[in-house]
Amino acid sequence: MTSRLLELREERGLLRARCAEQRRALAQHAFVLERACALADRAKAGGDWIKRHPALVGGAATFLVLARPARLRRVWRLARWVHGLWRGWRGIVHLRDKLPF
């Protein structure tokens, strides 16, 4: 083999190693961007939901403006309780999906 061919093979190996390192770095950066994009997707989905249910959002806003503070505290406690039940149910479903049987 000629020395030029050996040099080209060595250079090719170095370039492949450099490409592999760049792929690893890109994957790390993509992970951070993936989380940020997931958050943006959730925010967009929330905005879309509000656009699809304007009467519900308007009614809730009207209720909050017109309700007395004592009633709001009761509603807030009920909402926290319902949210706790919902999260508990989602946790049970998540665990059930992981069971082997």
Image (cartoon, rainbow, N blue to C red):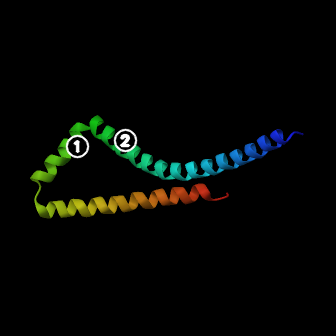
Residue furthest front in the image:
3
Q: Specify the quadrant of the image occupied by residue 4.
A: top right
Identify the element where label 2 is drawn: helix
Q: In screen coordinates, is 14 left or right of 90?
A: right
Q: In screen coordinates, is 44 left or right of 24?
A: left
Q: Amino acid at mark 1?
A: Val
Q: Amino acid at mark 2?
A: Ala
Relative image position of residue 21 (x, y in whole percent):
64, 51
Compare marks 1 and 2 and give the one earlier in the sequence. Answer: 2
At x 9% / y 52%, what residue is drawn?
66
- Image vertical order of residue 2 relative to residue 93, above or below: above
What's the mark number on residue 45? 2
33 and 100: which is toward the camera: 33
Relative image position of residue 6 (x, y in whole percent):
83, 43
At x 31% / y 62%, what residue is drawn?
80
What's the mark number on residue 57? 1
- Quarter that holds the C terminus: bottom right
Identify the element where label 1 is drawn: helix
Disc 2 crowd, CA 10 A, few/some/many (<14, 14-19, 20+): few
User: What whole-number distance in Å separates the C-alpha atoms at marks 1 and 2?
Assistant: 15 Å
